[in-house]
Image (cartoon, rainbow, N blue to C red):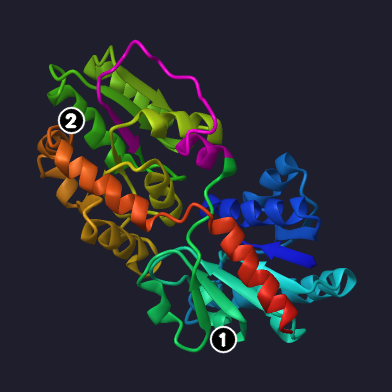
């Protein structure tokens, strides 16, 4: 099978697409990744030694504004370039995970009448996937509520690809370094790929309040917030049991998730899939500016199955986060129920399921 994979701009679109691309390549398929010059996908493909075709791409803004009209014109120009590349590759099918990098590829594939399979990570579809789904053979989903947004196309709940090293660690097939001498519960704080100033601030404040509690903290600030958060940490005099990092590679992230007891984090699809893989309960603070409030709806699905509770960004400044954390730490039955629910929600074989849909769709063309 000749497969073109696309999706990107941000890691939430890139990593699942790349996991599918690698698995397809490893099975003997001819695979190329089409992505933006400016997104995260180029560096990720270089690291994975994945053939990469680059083109200019950017988000398409509201068409009611001049900025939106200009971005649409650039999208159409990029689609022309991509059409020439696709004509040279002549793929059997195109697989896309969304994001602005996928838009020119999907638009070109639609115009060339190439079969398309889309993977929608969030409960509420992104702009690219929603528009292009009418031309798709199938849409693979992660959340149970997503199918209702795609009434005109076949949907299959395949789950979310989790980076292979993390999946292996979650399943106990890969041993990672840990500190066997420290058995205290650990709170993992994550603000998503971009970081979150609001989460960073409240985590430090809560850690000060809980200084007498036997507890470890592992705090991912995001690259742009690391220095300011470290400065605040030093001013507050937090000395022990508090580890702060800007960003972690997959192996380190797996170790942090494995050791954690409860997470305080955003509710992007990739984050929730990793929490499910490691069976970790969470306190979720959805990013309020997420398109279509999709992080809120993602979080609601976890809350409904008892795997998480939700705090809005406004609430987190006034709600007793210390009490919420202790409620998880002190209720083993609740944690066990959350772990059971996460095990039922998780799809460990997401990548093979997605490839099965892709192959079936290619063969039907």
Residue in the image at 29% along x and 25% along y: 217
Which span is picked out in magenta?
165-189
Left or right of 1, for residue 201: left
In this picture, is 324 found above or below 244? below
- Pinpoint residue 247: horizontal percent, then vertical percent: 49, 33
Residue in the image at 86% along x and 68% along y: 89
List the residue tagged with mark 2.
Answer: 206
Crowding at mark 2 (Cα within 10 Å: few <14, some 14-19, many 20+): some
Closer to the camera, 362 or 263?
362
In the rendered image, which quarter is residue 101 located in?
bottom right
Left or right of 188, for residue 326: left
Mark 1 → mark 2, Cα distance in angstroms: 47 Å
Q: State the mark number for residue 134.
A: 1
SS under mark 1: helix
Q: State the mark number for residue 295.
A: none
Residue in the image at 24% along x and 14% along y: 237
In this picture, is 204 found above or below 313? above
- Pinpoint residue 263: horizontal percent, then vertical percent: 30, 39
Left or right of 297, for residue 59: right
Q: Earlier in the sequence, mark 1 or mark 2?
A: 1
Q: Quadrant of the C terminus?
A: bottom right
């Amino acid at each position: 099978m000749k497969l073109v994979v696309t999706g990107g701009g941000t890691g939430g679109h890139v990593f699942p697409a790349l996991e599918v691309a690698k698995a397809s390549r490893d099975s003997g398929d001819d695979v190329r990744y089409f992505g933006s010059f400016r997104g995260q996908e180029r560096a990720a493909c270089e690291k994975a030694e994945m053939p990469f075709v680059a083109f200019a791409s950017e988000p398409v803004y509201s068409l009611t504004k001049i900025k939106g009209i200009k971005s649409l014109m650039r999208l159409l120009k990029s689609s022309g370039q991509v059409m020439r590349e696709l004509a040279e590759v002549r793929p059997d099918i195109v697989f896309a995970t969304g994001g602005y990098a996928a838009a020119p590829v999907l638009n070109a594939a639609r115009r060339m009448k190439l079969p398309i399979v889309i993977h929608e990570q969030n409960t509420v579809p992104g702009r690219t996937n929603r528009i292009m789904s009418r031309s798709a053979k199938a849409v693979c989903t992660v959340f149970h509520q997503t199918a209702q947004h795609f009434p005109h196309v076949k949907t299959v709940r395949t789950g979310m690809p989790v980076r292979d090293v993390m999946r292996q660690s979650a399943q106990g097939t890969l041993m990672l370094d840990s500190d066997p001498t420290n058995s205290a519960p650990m709170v993992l704080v994550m603000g998503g790929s971009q970081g979150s100033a609001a989460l960073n601030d409240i985590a430090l404040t809560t850690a000060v309040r809980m200084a007498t509690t036997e507890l470890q903290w592992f705090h991912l600030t995001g690259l742009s917030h690391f220095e300011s958060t470290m400065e605040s940490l030093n001013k507050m005099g937090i000395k022990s049991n508090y580890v702060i990092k800007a960003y972690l590679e997959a192996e380190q992230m797996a170790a942090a998730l494995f050791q954690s007891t409860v997470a305080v984090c955003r509710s992007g699809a990739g984050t929730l899939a990793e929490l499910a893989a490691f069976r970790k309960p969470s306190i979720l603070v959805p990013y309020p500016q997420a398109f279509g409030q999709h992080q809120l709806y993602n979080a609601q699905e976890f809350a409904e199955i008892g795997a998480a509770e939700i705090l809005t960004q406004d609430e987190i400044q006034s709600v007793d986060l210390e009490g919420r954390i202790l409620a998880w730490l002190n209720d083993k039955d609740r944690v066990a129920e959350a772990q059971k629910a996460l095990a039922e929600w998780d799809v460990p074989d997401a990548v093979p399921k997605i490839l099965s849909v892709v192959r079936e769709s290619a063969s039907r063309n």
